[in-house]
Amino acid sequence: MNLKQKILKTDTIKKTPHLVDEWGVNVLIRQWTGTERSMFLSYWSTKADDSQFYSKLLISCCEFEDGSKFEDKDADEINSQNGELLQKLADKILEVQKIGKAAVEEAKKN
C-alpha cells in the first residue's frame, strides 16, 4: 500500500460522547466528513428555514451507544423537545465540529 492509499484509508472521523442529562443517555457526536460540513454550511448560506436547525443538526451527526441514530422522519419530534436542551446540544455539536456560532450566522447572511 502506497502512502496515498494509506492516508485515504485512514478513519479520521471521531465520535465524542456527550451526556444529555434530560434524556439520561450519552449522545455520540460524530464529526462530519468534508462533504457533510460543506453541505451544512451551504444549507444555511441559502437562508434555509431556521425552524429545522436543531433537527437537521442532530440528524446529521448524533448517534447512540446502541448504534441507533436520528432519522429525517424524527425531525418533528426532535423539534418538540425542550428548546434549551436543544440549544445546549447544538452548541456542543458546533464545538465538536469546530464551527462557531459566528460561522453559522455568517453563512446565514451570505
Image: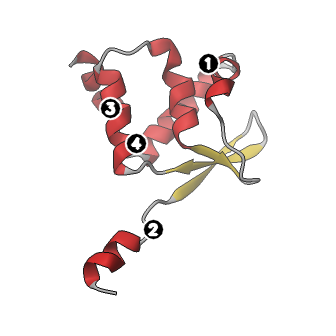
Q: Are marks 2 and 4 in contact (CB under 8 Å)?
A: no
- The answer to which of marks 2 and 3 sits earlier in the sequence is 2
Which quadrant, please, contains the C terminus?
top left
Question: Which residue is located at x 61 percent, y 18 percent?
Answer: 83
Residue placed under numbered mark 2 in the picture: 11
Looking at the rendering, which quadrant does residue 75 occupy? top right
Circle nearer the viewer, 1 or 3:
3
Specify few, some or many for label 2: CA neighbours under 10 Å numbering under 14, 14-19, or 20 or more: few
- The answer to which of marks 4 and 3 sits earlier in the sequence is 4
Q: Is residue 90 above or below residue 44?
A: below
- State the residue in front, 2 or 85: 2
Q: Is residue 74 above or below residue 3?
A: above
- State the residue in front, 64 or 43: 43
Residue placed under numbered mark 3 in the picture: 41
Task: Say the numbered circle drawn on residue 83.
Answer: 1
Q: CA distance from mark 2 to mark 3?
A: 23 Å
- The answer to which of marks 2 and 1 sits earlier in the sequence is 2
Specify few, some or many for label 4: CA neighbours under 10 Å numbering under 14, 14-19, or 20 or more: few
- The answer to which of marks 1 and 3 sits earlier in the sequence is 3
Question: Which residue is located at x 60 percent, y 26 percent?
Answer: 86
Q: Position of residue 27 (x, y in %)?
A: 66, 46
Which quadrant, please, contains the N terminus?
bottom left
| Amino acid type of the residue tagged 3 in the rendering | Leu
Q: CA distance from mark 4 to mark 3?
A: 9 Å
| Amino acid type of the residue tagged 2 in the rendering | Asp
Residue placed under numbered mark 4 in the picture: 36
- The answer to which of marks 2 and 4 sits earlier in the sequence is 2
| Amino acid type of the residue tagged 1 in the rendering | Gly
Residue 57, can we see it? yes
Question: Which residue is located at x 49 percent, y 22 percent?
Answer: 53
